[in-house]
Image (cartoon, rainbow, N blue to C red):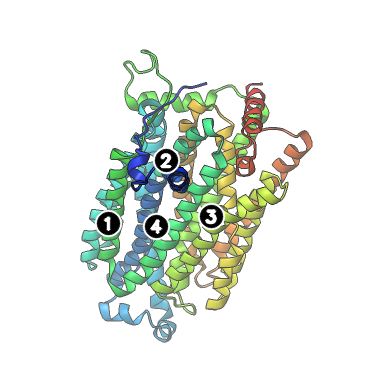
């Protein structure tokens, strides 16, 4: 087992919960005890907070940036082809129906620039995650992989502010900032670093799925607020304030990481580990070691299948996000940025609420297996994609909000199960591999969906969503096979199946599961 050193800031409970001067006596003692008992839950929550503020701030800024990026790319693409007056009129449904060909040209141009922008981010991000950032936390501590993407994101936001101030500039001038963001690992690096940090903390406390669930909820809730704010701000204030808010959040995230976040260091490395090799070569070696580590055959199969399912979900989610605004702005839907923000905000809210509330409830009140909950989330995602591709009216599209509410279950369950399949000192490399494969998948997704969507405009513009639903159905088949295997063999995949931590009532019971799972993994 690895040994981790956590430098925690000292909390003065007396300063946090000031006590009024009370005279001695039983009544005074009771009042002091009541005051202390009231403060204790608050102090407990404060002490348990680690990377959650960083995750919330960074993902809030990322979602805000992406929503505004789609909108500013659409407007810049229109200005490349038409004058400002025509572009303003194109937001009118009647005008758009009378100029269908011109609208489709703008859609095609926008899709092309969205694809180029995503490539500019994902290619550098993939190389960064594979070569050094994935194992950086295993070497120097879990705080370092959070600093790099925050710095890169700040540079990207400054670039966006300048480009938003001059809408007539070509969309090509946004690419340098996107490359810098990719070199920092982008949001995938932050997710990797945060999940690694949380799974390390859960080794001793046995609260893995609870922590991961809260982290997933933080991501979804931050996305909820950000897309609503972005849509409204774009329509009312323009693009510069949106990117300015994103910049402020990224600066706050960086400051919290550097000055307030406790650092977790993995096991001490030997001289040969940290010797003459360069950082990139050493990290690449670590990643190769992770791939070639001897594991039980069934553990390898489950680990690979979990990663494949997660990557397919990333493919569908990224592709949906790339084309959704274009799809909803196209007549006969002709949505405004504000309506788009309300829709995405509602969808993200229900998804986050389900992860934070329904997931623990299901585990507490039922004996349902983890894979069953993952399947429920996959079916929810698949049904939502089918409905989205068929809907033409606003009310029908908003039905997707309810249908898709369980789609956060697969990510939370899969990440927790994957982390529990490997040793603690390998978790940074595991999430580095996951983040790198997701980055590759994002690259493929933007090529496929942004390349295919313009070709479907004359045929059926919802075809991409139906294809995504088909891919999710493949995930359902994979998880069903795993569910059957796990049910038949009653296999314990982890030191404890961390999703059961949500309802654990005995610490001794948790520790016994942990030891049993560790022995099974070693065999």
The residue where tag 2 is placed is 47
Percent position of residue 134, x then y: 41, 34
Crowdedness of circle 4 by 10 Å Cα count: few (<14), some, many (20+)? many
Q: Which residue is mark 4?
A: 63
- The residue positioned 32% from the left and 40% from the top of the image is 260
Residue 12 in the figure: left or right of residue 502: left
Residue beneath disc 1: 174
Please identify the quadrant where the C terminus is shown: top right
The residue carrying pointer 2 sits among few (fewer than 14), some (14 to 19) or many (20 or more) residues within 10 Å by Cα, namely: few
> Foreground mark, 2 or 4?
2
60 or 474, nearer to the observer: 60
**Quick check: marks 1 and 3 in contact, CB under 8 Å?**
no
Viewer-side residue, 46 vs 239: 46
The x and y percentages for residue 413 are 59, 45
Whether residue 179 is visible: no
Q: State if disc 3 and disc 4 touch (CB < 8 Å).
A: no
**Residue at 55 percent of width and 48 percent of height:** 411
Q: Residue at x 45, y 74 (%)?
A: 330
In the structure shown, which secondary structural element does the residue marked by tag 4 occupy? helix
- Residue 25: x and y in percent read 43, 43
Q: N-terminal of the two: label 1 or label 2?
A: 2
Residue 488 placement (x, y as % from top left): 78, 37
């Amino acid at each position: 087992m690895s040994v981790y050193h956590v430098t925690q800031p000292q909390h003065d409970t007396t300063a946090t919960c000031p006590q009024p001067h009370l005279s001695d006596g039983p009544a005074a003692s009771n009042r002091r005890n009541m005051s202390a008992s009231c403060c204790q839950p608050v102090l407990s929550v404060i002490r348990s907070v680690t990377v959650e503020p960083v995750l919330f701030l960074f993902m809030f800024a990322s979602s805000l940036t992406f929503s505004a990026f789609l909108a500013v790319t659409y407007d810049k693409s229109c200005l490349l082809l038409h004058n400002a007056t025509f572009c303003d009129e194109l937001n009118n449904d009647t005008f758009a129906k009378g100029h269908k060909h011109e609208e489709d040209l703008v859609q095609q141009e926008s899709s092309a620039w969205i694809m180029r922008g995503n490539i500019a981010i994902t290619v550098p991000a993939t190389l960064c995650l594979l070569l050094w950032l994935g194992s950086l936390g295993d070497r120097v501590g879990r705080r370092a992989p959070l600093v790099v993407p925050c710095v890169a994101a700040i540079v990207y936001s400054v670039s966006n502010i300048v480009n938003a101030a001059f809408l007539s500039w070509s969309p090509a001038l946004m690419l340098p900032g996107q490359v810098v963001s990719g070199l920092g690992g982008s949001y995938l690096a932050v997710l990797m670093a945060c999940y690694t940090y949380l799974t390390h903390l859960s080794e001793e406390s046995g609260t893995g799925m609870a922590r991961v669930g809260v982290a997933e909820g933080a991501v979804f809730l931050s996305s909820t607020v950000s897309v609503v704010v972005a849509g409204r701000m774009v329509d009312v204030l323009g693009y510069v304030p949106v990117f300015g808010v994103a910049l402020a959040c990224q600066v706050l995230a960086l400051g919290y990481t550097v000055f307030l976040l406790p650092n977790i260091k993995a096991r001490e490395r030997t001289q040969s580990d940290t010797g003459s090799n360069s950082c990139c070569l050493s990290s690449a070696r670590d990643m190769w070691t992770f791939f070639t580590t001897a594991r039980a055959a069934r553990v390898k199969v489950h680990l690979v299948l979990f990663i494949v399912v997660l990557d397919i979900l990333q493919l569908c989610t990224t592709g949906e996000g790339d084309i959704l605004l274009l799809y909803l702005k196209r007549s006969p839907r002709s949505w405004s940025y504000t309506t788009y923000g309300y829709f995405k905000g509602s969808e993200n809210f229900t998804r986050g609420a389900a992860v934070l509330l329904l997931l623990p409830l299901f585990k507490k009140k039922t004996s349902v297996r983890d894979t069953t909950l993952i399947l429920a989330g996959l079916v929810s995602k698949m049904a939502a994609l089918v409905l989205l591709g068929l809907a033409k009216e606003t009310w029908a599209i908003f039905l997707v909000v309810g249908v898709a509410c369980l789609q956060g279950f697969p990510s939370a369950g899969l990440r927790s199960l994957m982390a529990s399949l490997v040793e603690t000192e390998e978790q940074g490399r595991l999430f580095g591999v996951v983040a790198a494969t997701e980055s590759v998948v994002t690259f493929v997704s933007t090529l496929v969906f942004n390349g295919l969507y313009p070709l479907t405009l004359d045929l059926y513009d919802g075809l991409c969503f139906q294809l995504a639903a088909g891919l999710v159905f493949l995930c359902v088949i994979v998880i069903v096979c795993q569910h059957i295997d796990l049910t038949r063999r009653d296999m314990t995949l982890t030191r404890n199946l961390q999703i059961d931590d949500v309802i654990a009532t005995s610490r001794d019971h948790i520790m016994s599961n942990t030891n049993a799972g560790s022995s099974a993994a070693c065999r």
